[in-house]
Image (cartoon, coloured by chain):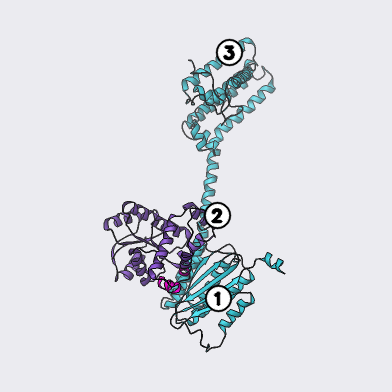
Chain colours: A purple, B cyan
């Protein structure tokens, strides 16, 4: 699998490369927004691992620009920050997953393969955020555009927020791993499509922005 | 020179009285300062200016109903309006509606000087006014033609003062006293204006700089107390990986809280209390505890009990599970608090009697039962442990009414 790395810290890129280099082929890396867009479009990697905070626009800008030219690009966001604003911004821009930088090498490789095969990668934190956003903790919950989660999707999110892996979720709910993945992808879609202002207002209200 | 149409609409913005002068000026491409100056001097000449203003008001339309878009001021038109005004003045003088040369000459010169200064004002265009409404001083003294304006203004004021001086003794000294004072004030204002403006500007830029400096100092102080201290400690304990990791972990969560404000204003909410508890356990036992929180609410007796029980569960996981990663999930709704503490460690057989017999599970369970909650422990050897704690969350008002 061909990977492109975007992070403004060369040291961090080197670390990730050393960690995942055994299993994956790192075909390019960049430390700034413009270089990243040009590099990704030139190398066409299978998955781009992108940092959320970058000088000159951030991961969101990269994802938006690349997807505009190459809609099949796959992104996994990796960040040290876990503020809700960042989560919302990259997921809405089109990232298929969000993991924090404290993730272990094996888990990172697993997450990369997962987004590559078309699944969504939800860290517990992201699942918690999703639950908060969809479960009536919104100040104005009655927005028709904000799709509600089904009971099953809510159960799945809750287990992921509790630290369960997809496999463990499947075992707990007596489902197949594939079904769990389908639920997670559905949640990701709802998150990407639901009313932008509503979520921003929610994040504002809680002073997360 | 015939104006396109005599009718005009009064001006609503930047007007002094009813906006007649401004409306006229906009419609006929004359600088409003010239129109105002003409009206002032003509008012002193037998009240003609007042009459003209009243007539203009009757003939003009209400503000907003624009007859045609405003014309930019044109120097030729300014001059012609000035000439017409001068002619009208001479006619009034001939007609005897006149205060006397001694009084009128300095007034006419001073008003003309003032009008000249305004016409040459650097930002004479309306949009420039609205662009920088905050600094009228800079508007008058800065920019284009600044030196010419100051010299011209000073010259006109000097002439006015000389005229006043020459005529002293000929006419009533009281009147000239007033003129002399007014002229002097205007002259001083024009001469010292730029200096005042500079001082004011310096003061405000100094204030901005001071605020910036204060902010930088506050940030430097914070970084010194936290990040730099930690980095120094890490360097010293480089050969003790556990301690290094613990230091880095603690600093990371502190800095994160400072940057993103995950710390709430008070510790009086469930999530804030959980985070405080987790940090303590992390420090004591060198484990990493990830907290995911959904919802939040004020602390009640019941939630305090749940958090105390969750602390026990975290400590157990840290001490007995054999791994150093623990997940805590807390969900607060209007009527319940729920906490899950999970590790992927060795686990234990919940059915088997506990060897140590310290009754930790017992103490967790008992604690929750007292507040009407319950605890469940799910574990099996090799599969980690999950402790599930729930308790109702009663708000104070309910407790009062239930008794």
Helix, strand, or loop for circle 1? helix
Are both tags, 1 and 3, on one chain? yes
Q: Nearer the viewer, residue B36 or B367?
A: B367
The residue carrying mark 2 is A140
Picture layout, residue B79 above or below residue B200 = above
Per the image, is B50 magenta?
no
Q: Which residues are magenta?
A: A159-174
The reply to whether label 2 and label 3 mark residues of one chain is no
Give SS at disc 3.
Answer: helix
Residue A33, quarter of the rendered image: bottom left
The residue that label 1 is drawn on is B311
Query: Real-space Cα distance between discs 2 and 3?
Result: 74 Å
Q: Return the residue nearer the eye: A111 or B378.
A: B378
User: Viewer-nearest of labels 1 and 3?
Assistant: 1
Residue B4: x %, y % from top left: 48, 18
Query: How many numbered marks have been drawn onto this rendered protein structure?
Result: 3
Residue B116: % across, % down: 52, 25
Using the rendered image of the protein, determine whether residue A12 is visible from the camera's viewpoint: yes
Cα distance between the residues tagged 1 and 2: 34 Å
Relative to residue B68, is residue B88 depicted above or below?
Answer: above
């Amino acid at each position: 699998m061909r990977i492109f790395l975007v992070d403004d810290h060369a040291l961090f890129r080197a670390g990730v490369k050393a960690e995942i280099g055994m299993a994956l082929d790192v075909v390019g890396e960049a430390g700034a927004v413009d270089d990243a867009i040009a590099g990704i479009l030139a190398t066409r990697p299978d998955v781009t691992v992108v940092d959320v905070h970058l000088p000159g626009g951030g991961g969101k800008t990269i994802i938006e620009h690349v997807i505009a030219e190459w809609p099949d690009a796959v992104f996994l966001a990796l960040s040290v920050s876990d503020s809700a604003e960042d989560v919302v911004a990259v997921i809405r821009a089109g990232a298929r997953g969000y993991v924090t930088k404290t993730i272990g090498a094996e888990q990172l490789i697993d997450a990369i393969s997962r987004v590559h095969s078309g699944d969504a990668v939800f860290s517990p934190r992201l699942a918690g955020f999703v639950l908060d956003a969809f479960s009536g903790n919104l100040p104005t919950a009655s927005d028709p555009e904000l799709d509600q989660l089904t009971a099953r999707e809510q159960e799945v999110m809750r287990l992921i927020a509790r630290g369960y892996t997809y496999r463990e979720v499947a075992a707990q709910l007596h489902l197949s791993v594939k079904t769990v993945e389908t639920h997670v992808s559905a949640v990701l879609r709802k998150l990407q499509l639901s009313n932008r202002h509503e979520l921003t207002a929610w994040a504002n209200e809680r002073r997360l922005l | 020179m015939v104006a396109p149409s005599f009718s005009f609409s009064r001006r609503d913005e930047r007007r002094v009285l009813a906006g007649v002068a401004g409306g006229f000026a906009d419609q006929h491409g004359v600088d409003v300062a010239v129109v105002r100056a003409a009206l002032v001097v003509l008012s002193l000449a037998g009240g003609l200016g007042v009459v003209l203003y009243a007539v203009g008001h009757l003939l003009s339309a209400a503000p907003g109903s624009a007859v045609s878009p405003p014309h930019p001021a044109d120097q030729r038109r300014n001059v012609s309006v000035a000439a017409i005004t001068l002619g009208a003045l001479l006619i009034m003088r001939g007609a005897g509606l006149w205060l006397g040369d001694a009084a009128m000459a300095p007034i006419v010169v001073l008003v003309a000087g003032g009008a000249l200064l305004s016409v040459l004002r650097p930002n004479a265009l309306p949009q420039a006014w609205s662009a920088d409404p905050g600094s009228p001083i800079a508007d008058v003294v800065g920019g284009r033609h600044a030196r010419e304006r100051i010299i011209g203004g000073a010259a006109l004021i000097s002439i006015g003062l000389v005229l006043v001086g020459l005529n002293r003794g000929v006419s009533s000294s009281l009147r000239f006293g007033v003129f002399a004072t007014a002229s002097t004030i205007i002259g001083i204002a024009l001469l010292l204006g730029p200096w005042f403006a500079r001082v004011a500007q310096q003061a405000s830029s100094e204030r901005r700089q001071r605020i910036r400096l204060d902010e930088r100092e506050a940030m430097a102080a914070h970084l010194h107390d936290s990040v730099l201290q930690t980095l120094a400690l890490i360097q010293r304990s480089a050969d003790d990986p556990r301690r290094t990791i613990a230091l880095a972990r603690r600093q990371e969560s502190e800095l994160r809280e400072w940057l993103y404000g995950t710390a709430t204003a008070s510790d009086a909410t469930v999530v804030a209390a959980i985070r405080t508890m987790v940090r303590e356990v992390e420090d004591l036992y060198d484990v990493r505890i990830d907290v995911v929180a959904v919802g939040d609410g004020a602390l009640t007796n019941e939630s305090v009990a749940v958090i105390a029980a969750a602390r026990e569960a975290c400590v157990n996981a840290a001490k007995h599970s054999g791994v150093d990663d623990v997940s805590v999930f807390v969900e607060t709704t209007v009527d319940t608090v729920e906490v899950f503490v999970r590790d992927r460690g060795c686990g234990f057989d919940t059915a088997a009697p506990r060897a140590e017999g310290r009754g930790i599970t017992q103490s967790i369970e008992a604690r929750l039962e007292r507040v009407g909650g319950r605890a469940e422990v799910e574990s099996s050897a090799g599969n980690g442990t999950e402790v599930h704690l729930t308790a109702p969350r009663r708000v104070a008002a309910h407790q009062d009414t239930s008794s």
